[in-house]
Image (tube, rainbow, N blue to C red):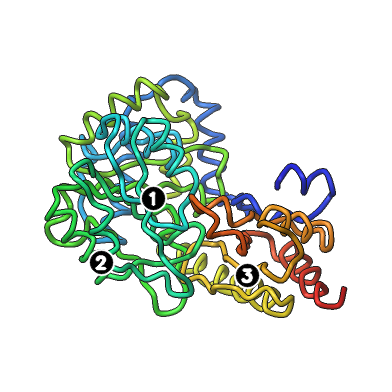
Amino acid sequence: MSIECERMGGINLSQGVVDTEVPIVVRQAAQRAIDEGVNTYTHHEGLVQLRKAIAEKHKRFTGVEFDPEGEIVVSSGATGALYCTCLALLEPGDEVIVFEPFYGYHVTTLIATEAVPKHVRLDPPGWEIVRENVEKAITPKTRAIILNTPSNPSGKVFSRNEIEMIGDLAEKHDLFIFTDEIYEHFIYGSKSHISPASIPGLSDRTITISGVSKTFSITGWRIGYCLCNKKWAEAIGYFNDLVYVCAPAPLQVGVAKGLINLGDDYYSKIEEEYHIKRDKICNALDAAGLTPCVPQGAYYVLADISGIHGKNSKERVMNLLNKTGVACVPGEAFYHDDAGETLARFCFAKEDKVLDEACRRLEQLMKK
Protein backbone atom coordinates (compact mmCIF):
# COMPACT_ATOMS: atom_id res chain seq x y z
CA MET A 1 0.00 0.00 0.00
CA SER A 2 2.93 2.34 0.66
CA ILE A 3 4.17 1.68 -2.89
CA GLU A 4 0.72 2.26 -4.39
CA CYS A 5 0.27 5.40 -2.31
CA GLU A 6 3.59 6.81 -3.49
CA ARG A 7 2.75 5.98 -7.08
CA MET A 8 -0.50 7.94 -6.81
CA GLY A 9 0.93 10.77 -4.73
CA GLY A 10 -1.52 10.03 -1.92
CA ILE A 11 -1.41 10.32 1.87
CA ASN A 12 0.09 7.25 3.50
CA LEU A 13 -1.84 6.09 6.58
CA SER A 14 -0.79 2.50 5.95
CA GLN A 15 2.75 1.86 7.15
CA GLY A 16 3.45 2.61 10.82
CA VAL A 17 6.06 5.26 10.08
CA VAL A 18 6.14 8.09 12.60
CA ASP A 19 6.82 11.42 10.92
CA THR A 20 6.91 13.60 14.03
CA GLU A 21 10.16 15.32 15.07
CA VAL A 22 13.06 13.39 16.62
CA PRO A 23 14.00 14.89 20.02
CA ILE A 24 16.95 17.21 19.55
CA VAL A 25 18.88 15.71 22.48
CA VAL A 26 18.74 12.31 20.75
CA ARG A 27 19.86 13.67 17.38
CA GLN A 28 22.71 15.74 18.75
CA ALA A 29 24.06 12.95 20.96
CA ALA A 30 24.17 10.54 17.99
CA GLN A 31 25.89 13.15 15.81
CA ARG A 32 28.48 13.84 18.51
CA ALA A 33 29.10 10.11 18.91
CA ILE A 34 29.89 9.80 15.20
CA ASP A 35 32.27 12.77 15.36
CA GLU A 36 33.94 11.37 18.49
CA GLY A 37 34.60 8.00 16.86
CA VAL A 38 31.91 5.75 18.33
CA ASN A 39 31.68 3.91 15.03
CA THR A 40 32.90 0.39 15.71
CA TYR A 41 31.34 -2.77 17.12
CA THR A 42 29.86 -2.62 20.58
CA HIS A 43 29.34 -5.50 22.99
CA HIS A 44 26.67 -7.74 21.48
CA GLU A 45 24.32 -6.91 24.37
CA GLY A 46 24.69 -3.18 23.69
CA LEU A 47 26.61 -0.26 25.17
CA VAL A 48 26.61 -0.33 28.96
CA GLN A 49 25.36 3.27 29.23
CA LEU A 50 22.35 2.36 27.09
CA ARG A 51 21.59 -0.78 29.10
CA LYS A 52 21.77 1.23 32.32
CA ALA A 53 19.46 3.89 30.86
CA ILE A 54 16.97 1.24 29.75
CA ALA A 55 17.00 -0.39 33.20
CA GLU A 56 16.42 2.93 34.96
CA LYS A 57 13.63 4.00 32.62
CA HIS A 58 11.88 0.62 32.83
CA LYS A 59 11.99 0.64 36.62
CA ARG A 60 10.61 4.18 36.66
CA PHE A 61 7.59 3.32 34.57
CA THR A 62 6.84 -0.32 35.50
CA GLY A 63 8.47 -0.81 38.88
CA VAL A 64 10.38 -3.85 37.56
CA GLU A 65 14.15 -3.97 38.10
CA PHE A 66 16.49 -5.53 35.54
CA ASP A 67 20.25 -5.83 35.91
CA PRO A 68 21.95 -4.02 33.00
CA GLU A 69 24.81 -6.50 33.41
CA GLY A 70 23.19 -9.66 32.09
CA GLU A 71 19.44 -9.09 31.87
CA ILE A 72 19.18 -6.64 28.96
CA VAL A 73 20.01 -7.27 25.30
CA VAL A 74 19.98 -4.37 22.83
CA SER A 75 19.14 -5.57 19.33
CA SER A 76 18.21 -4.38 15.85
CA GLY A 77 14.80 -3.03 16.74
CA ALA A 78 12.06 -4.79 18.69
CA THR A 79 11.63 -7.14 15.73
CA GLY A 80 15.29 -8.14 16.04
CA ALA A 81 14.86 -8.74 19.76
CA LEU A 82 11.86 -11.00 19.11
CA TYR A 83 13.68 -12.89 16.36
CA CYS A 84 16.65 -13.62 18.62
CA THR A 85 14.28 -14.59 21.43
CA CYS A 86 12.55 -17.13 19.20
CA LEU A 87 15.87 -18.53 17.97
CA ALA A 88 17.11 -18.90 21.53
CA LEU A 89 14.04 -20.25 23.32
CA LEU A 90 11.98 -22.15 20.73
CA GLU A 91 12.61 -25.39 18.89
CA PRO A 92 11.24 -26.24 15.43
CA GLY A 93 7.64 -27.38 15.83
CA ASP A 94 7.03 -25.53 19.10
CA GLU A 95 3.62 -23.86 19.16
CA VAL A 96 3.06 -20.27 20.23
CA ILE A 97 -0.32 -18.70 21.06
CA VAL A 98 -0.93 -15.53 19.01
CA PHE A 99 -3.93 -13.28 19.62
CA GLU A 100 -5.76 -12.25 16.47
CA PRO A 101 -5.86 -9.69 14.87
CA PHE A 102 -2.08 -9.99 15.02
CA TYR A 103 0.93 -7.95 14.00
CA GLY A 104 2.28 -9.65 10.89
CA TYR A 105 5.93 -9.59 11.96
CA HIS A 106 5.11 -11.65 15.04
CA VAL A 107 3.65 -14.44 12.92
CA THR A 108 6.30 -14.31 10.20
CA THR A 109 9.05 -14.34 12.83
CA LEU A 110 7.60 -17.50 14.34
CA ILE A 111 7.37 -19.12 10.92
CA ALA A 112 10.92 -18.02 10.04
CA THR A 113 12.22 -19.77 13.17
CA GLU A 114 10.13 -22.88 12.39
CA ALA A 115 7.73 -22.35 15.28
CA VAL A 116 3.98 -22.79 14.74
CA PRO A 117 1.55 -19.91 15.44
CA LYS A 118 -1.75 -20.95 17.05
CA HIS A 119 -4.37 -18.25 16.60
CA VAL A 120 -6.84 -17.19 19.28
CA ARG A 121 -9.48 -14.81 17.95
CA LEU A 122 -10.39 -11.62 19.80
CA ASP A 123 -13.60 -9.92 18.72
CA PRO A 124 -14.37 -6.19 18.37
CA PRO A 125 -15.10 -3.76 19.78
CA GLY A 126 -13.55 -4.72 23.14
CA TRP A 127 -11.21 -7.47 21.96
CA GLU A 128 -11.67 -9.29 25.31
CA ILE A 129 -9.81 -12.52 25.99
CA VAL A 130 -11.93 -15.61 26.66
CA ARG A 131 -9.98 -18.00 28.90
CA GLU A 132 -11.64 -21.10 27.46
CA ASN A 133 -10.52 -20.14 23.94
CA VAL A 134 -6.91 -19.81 25.07
CA GLU A 135 -6.99 -23.12 26.94
CA LYS A 136 -8.41 -24.89 23.89
CA ALA A 137 -5.46 -23.68 21.82
CA ILE A 138 -2.86 -25.02 24.27
CA THR A 139 -1.41 -28.44 23.46
CA PRO A 140 1.61 -30.43 24.72
CA LYS A 141 3.62 -28.66 21.97
CA THR A 142 2.77 -25.15 23.20
CA ARG A 143 5.83 -23.29 24.44
CA ALA A 144 4.85 -19.61 24.66
CA ILE A 145 2.16 -16.94 24.43
CA ILE A 146 2.79 -13.66 22.58
CA LEU A 147 1.20 -10.48 23.91
CA ASN A 148 1.29 -7.11 22.20
CA THR A 149 0.10 -4.44 24.60
CA PRO A 150 -0.90 -1.87 23.47
CA SER A 151 -1.69 -3.84 20.35
CA ASN A 152 -1.00 -3.32 16.70
CA PRO A 153 -3.45 -3.30 14.86
CA SER A 154 -6.41 -3.20 17.27
CA GLY A 155 -5.12 -0.70 19.82
CA LYS A 156 -6.17 -3.03 22.64
CA VAL A 157 -4.56 -2.46 26.04
CA PHE A 158 -4.57 -5.69 28.02
CA SER A 159 -6.00 -5.25 31.52
CA ARG A 160 -4.39 -6.49 34.72
CA ASN A 161 -7.10 -9.16 35.04
CA GLU A 162 -6.42 -10.40 31.50
CA ILE A 163 -2.67 -10.50 32.05
CA GLU A 164 -3.09 -12.30 35.35
CA MET A 165 -5.31 -14.85 33.60
CA ILE A 166 -2.69 -15.35 30.88
CA GLY A 167 -0.06 -15.63 33.59
CA ASP A 168 -2.09 -18.28 35.37
CA LEU A 169 -2.28 -20.33 32.17
CA ALA A 170 1.45 -19.80 31.52
CA GLU A 171 2.28 -21.09 34.99
CA LYS A 172 -0.14 -24.00 34.71
CA HIS A 173 1.36 -25.17 31.39
CA ASP A 174 4.94 -23.90 31.97
CA LEU A 175 4.94 -21.43 29.09
CA PHE A 176 6.99 -18.36 28.26
CA ILE A 177 5.26 -15.00 27.86
CA PHE A 178 6.75 -12.94 25.03
CA THR A 179 5.42 -9.42 25.46
CA ASP A 180 5.90 -6.70 22.84
CA GLU A 181 5.48 -3.34 24.60
CA ILE A 182 6.78 -1.00 21.90
CA TYR A 183 3.65 1.21 22.20
CA GLU A 184 3.77 1.40 26.01
CA HIS A 185 3.59 5.23 26.04
CA PHE A 186 0.66 5.51 23.64
CA ILE A 187 -2.27 5.03 26.07
CA TYR A 188 -5.60 6.84 26.01
CA GLY A 189 -8.34 7.61 28.53
CA SER A 190 -8.46 5.68 31.78
CA LYS A 191 -6.35 2.77 30.56
CA SER A 192 -2.85 2.12 31.88
CA HIS A 193 0.00 -0.01 30.61
CA ILE A 194 0.62 -3.17 32.65
CA SER A 195 3.89 -4.95 31.95
CA PRO A 196 3.43 -8.71 32.51
CA ALA A 197 6.84 -8.90 34.22
CA SER A 198 5.41 -6.67 36.97
CA ILE A 199 2.81 -9.30 37.93
CA PRO A 200 4.05 -11.36 40.92
CA GLY A 201 5.36 -14.74 39.83
CA LEU A 202 5.68 -13.94 36.13
CA SER A 203 9.03 -12.19 35.84
CA ASP A 204 11.12 -15.35 35.35
CA ARG A 205 9.01 -16.61 32.44
CA THR A 206 8.43 -13.23 30.77
CA ILE A 207 10.58 -11.86 27.94
CA THR A 208 9.80 -8.14 27.72
CA ILE A 209 10.46 -6.64 24.28
CA SER A 210 10.37 -2.93 23.55
CA GLY A 211 12.30 -0.10 21.95
CA VAL A 212 12.30 3.59 21.11
CA SER A 213 11.38 3.57 17.42
CA LYS A 214 7.94 4.97 18.18
CA THR A 215 8.53 7.21 21.22
CA PHE A 216 11.58 8.93 19.68
CA SER A 217 10.30 8.79 16.05
CA ILE A 218 13.37 6.86 14.89
CA THR A 219 11.93 3.79 13.20
CA GLY A 220 14.92 3.66 10.83
CA TRP A 221 17.53 3.60 13.59
CA ARG A 222 16.67 0.03 14.60
CA ILE A 223 17.29 0.25 18.35
CA GLY A 224 15.21 -2.22 20.34
CA TYR A 225 15.81 -4.46 23.31
CA CYS A 226 14.59 -7.30 25.46
CA LEU A 227 14.61 -7.61 29.24
CA CYS A 228 14.47 -10.95 31.02
CA ASN A 229 16.06 -13.32 33.51
CA LYS A 230 19.81 -13.74 32.99
CA LYS A 231 19.46 -17.43 32.09
CA TRP A 232 17.38 -16.48 29.03
CA ALA A 233 19.22 -13.25 28.20
CA GLU A 234 22.53 -15.04 27.80
CA ALA A 235 21.20 -17.30 25.03
CA ILE A 236 19.29 -14.43 23.38
CA GLY A 237 22.50 -12.38 23.41
CA TYR A 238 24.43 -15.14 21.66
CA PHE A 239 21.90 -15.21 18.82
CA ASN A 240 21.90 -11.41 18.68
CA ASP A 241 25.67 -11.58 18.18
CA LEU A 242 25.27 -14.23 15.48
CA VAL A 243 22.53 -12.47 13.49
CA TYR A 244 23.19 -8.75 14.01
CA VAL A 245 26.60 -8.50 15.79
CA CYS A 246 25.33 -5.32 17.46
CA ALA A 247 22.93 -2.43 17.05
CA PRO A 248 24.37 0.74 15.40
CA ALA A 249 26.93 2.13 17.86
CA PRO A 250 26.48 5.93 17.59
CA LEU A 251 22.70 5.57 17.52
CA GLN A 252 22.86 3.64 20.78
CA VAL A 253 24.57 6.68 22.30
CA GLY A 254 21.81 8.97 21.05
CA VAL A 255 19.08 6.76 22.48
CA ALA A 256 20.86 6.47 25.83
CA LYS A 257 21.07 10.25 26.08
CA GLY A 258 17.37 10.56 25.28
CA LEU A 259 16.35 8.00 27.89
CA ILE A 260 18.47 9.75 30.52
CA ASN A 261 17.55 13.36 29.73
CA LEU A 262 13.89 13.22 28.71
CA GLY A 263 11.67 13.32 31.78
CA ASP A 264 8.20 11.94 32.45
CA ASP A 265 6.63 15.04 30.92
CA TYR A 266 7.98 14.01 27.50
CA TYR A 267 6.02 10.75 27.62
CA SER A 268 2.92 12.46 29.02
CA LYS A 269 3.01 14.87 26.09
CA ILE A 270 3.05 11.92 23.67
CA GLU A 271 -0.14 10.57 25.24
CA GLU A 272 -1.84 13.96 25.04
CA GLU A 273 -0.84 14.64 21.43
CA TYR A 274 -1.77 11.20 20.17
CA HIS A 275 -5.07 11.20 22.04
CA ILE A 276 -6.02 14.25 19.97
CA LYS A 277 -4.81 12.56 16.77
CA ARG A 278 -6.82 9.44 17.61
CA ASP A 279 -10.01 11.43 18.07
CA LYS A 280 -9.43 13.28 14.79
CA ILE A 281 -9.10 10.14 12.71
CA CYS A 282 -11.95 8.32 14.45
CA ASN A 283 -14.30 11.29 13.91
CA ALA A 284 -13.32 11.45 10.24
CA LEU A 285 -13.86 7.71 9.77
CA ASP A 286 -17.28 8.00 11.41
CA ALA A 287 -18.17 10.86 9.08
CA ALA A 288 -17.04 8.76 6.12
CA GLY A 289 -19.30 5.87 7.12
CA LEU A 290 -16.27 3.74 8.05
CA THR A 291 -17.11 2.89 11.66
CA PRO A 292 -13.90 2.76 13.74
CA CYS A 293 -13.06 0.43 16.62
CA VAL A 294 -11.77 3.23 18.84
CA PRO A 295 -8.29 2.18 20.05
CA GLN A 296 -7.28 2.22 23.73
CA GLY A 297 -3.59 2.57 22.84
CA ALA A 298 -0.95 2.48 20.06
CA TYR A 299 -1.49 4.69 17.00
CA TYR A 300 -3.62 2.60 14.69
CA VAL A 301 -7.36 2.22 14.27
CA LEU A 302 -9.25 -0.63 12.64
CA ALA A 303 -12.34 0.52 10.76
CA ASP A 304 -15.25 -1.18 9.02
CA ILE A 305 -14.83 -0.81 5.24
CA SER A 306 -17.65 -3.20 4.27
CA GLY A 307 -19.49 -0.31 2.62
CA ILE A 308 -16.72 0.19 0.06
CA HIS A 309 -17.04 -1.75 -3.18
CA GLY A 310 -14.79 -4.79 -3.54
CA LYS A 311 -14.84 -8.55 -3.08
CA ASN A 312 -12.11 -8.50 -0.40
CA SER A 313 -10.25 -6.06 1.85
CA LYS A 314 -7.44 -5.49 -0.66
CA GLU A 315 -9.86 -4.42 -3.40
CA ARG A 316 -11.74 -2.22 -0.93
CA VAL A 317 -8.66 -0.33 0.27
CA MET A 318 -7.48 0.13 -3.32
CA ASN A 319 -10.87 1.60 -4.17
CA LEU A 320 -10.62 3.86 -1.12
CA LEU A 321 -7.17 5.00 -2.24
CA ASN A 322 -8.47 5.72 -5.73
CA LYS A 323 -11.43 7.72 -4.38
CA THR A 324 -9.75 9.69 -1.60
CA GLY A 325 -5.98 9.44 -2.10
CA VAL A 326 -5.67 7.97 1.42
CA ALA A 327 -3.84 4.66 1.84
CA CYS A 328 -4.52 2.14 4.60
CA VAL A 329 -3.76 -1.56 5.19
CA PRO A 330 -6.31 -4.26 4.24
CA GLY A 331 -7.61 -6.24 7.21
CA GLU A 332 -6.53 -9.53 5.65
CA ALA A 333 -2.97 -8.68 6.75
CA PHE A 334 -3.92 -9.29 10.39
CA TYR A 335 -5.82 -12.58 10.19
CA HIS A 336 -4.97 -16.12 9.14
CA ASP A 337 -8.36 -16.55 7.45
CA ASP A 338 -10.97 -14.29 5.83
CA ALA A 339 -12.12 -12.65 9.10
CA GLY A 340 -10.46 -9.35 8.21
CA GLU A 341 -12.02 -8.84 4.79
CA THR A 342 -14.30 -6.02 5.99
CA LEU A 343 -11.61 -4.21 8.00
CA ALA A 344 -8.75 -1.81 7.30
CA ARG A 345 -6.05 -0.31 9.51
CA PHE A 346 -5.31 3.41 9.51
CA CYS A 347 -2.13 4.82 11.10
CA PHE A 348 -2.51 8.26 12.70
CA ALA A 349 1.14 8.85 13.67
CA LYS A 350 1.34 11.83 11.33
CA GLU A 351 2.09 15.53 11.49
CA ASP A 352 -1.07 17.50 12.16
CA LYS A 353 -1.22 19.09 8.70
CA VAL A 354 -0.91 15.69 7.03
CA LEU A 355 -3.45 14.03 9.30
CA ASP A 356 -5.87 16.96 8.91
CA GLU A 357 -5.74 16.68 5.12
CA ALA A 358 -6.25 12.91 5.29
CA CYS A 359 -9.28 13.42 7.54
CA ARG A 360 -10.68 16.06 5.18
CA ARG A 361 -10.39 13.68 2.24
CA LEU A 362 -12.01 10.81 4.15
CA GLU A 363 -14.89 13.00 5.27
CA GLN A 364 -15.65 13.75 1.60
CA LEU A 365 -16.19 10.04 0.89
CA MET A 366 -19.90 10.09 1.69
CA LYS A 367 -20.37 12.97 -0.77
CA LYS A 368 -18.83 11.07 -3.68
Q: Which residue is mark 1?
A: 260
Q: Quadrant location of residue 291?
A: bottom right
Q: Quadrant location of residue 238?
A: top left
Q: Residue 367: horizontal and vertical position, in percent?
A: 86, 77
Q: Is residue 258 above or below residue 235?
A: below
User: Is any atom of residue 47 visible in this view?
Assistant: no
For the residues labelled 2 and 3, the Cα–Cα distance comes to: 27 Å
State left or right for residue 115 relative to residue 38.
left
Q: Secondary structure at mark 2?
A: helix
Q: Secondary structure at mark 1?
A: helix
Q: Residue 201: horizontal and vertical position, in percent?
A: 12, 57
Q: Which residue is mark 3?
A: 304
State left or right for residue 201 relative to residue 71.
left
Q: Quadrant location of residue 128?
A: bottom left
Amino acid tagged 2: Arg
Q: Residue 290: horizontal and vertical position, in percent?
A: 68, 73
Amino acid tagged 3: Asp
**Circle on res. 131:** 2
Q: Nearer the viewer, mark 2 or mark 1?
A: 2
Give the residue displayed 29% in from the left and 63% down from the top: 133
Q: Residue 264: horizontal and vertical position, in percent?
A: 40, 64
279 or 1: nearer the viewer: 1
State left or right for residue 287 relative to residue 213.
right
Amino acid tagged 1: Ile
Give the residue displayed 40% in from the left and 79% down from the top: 190
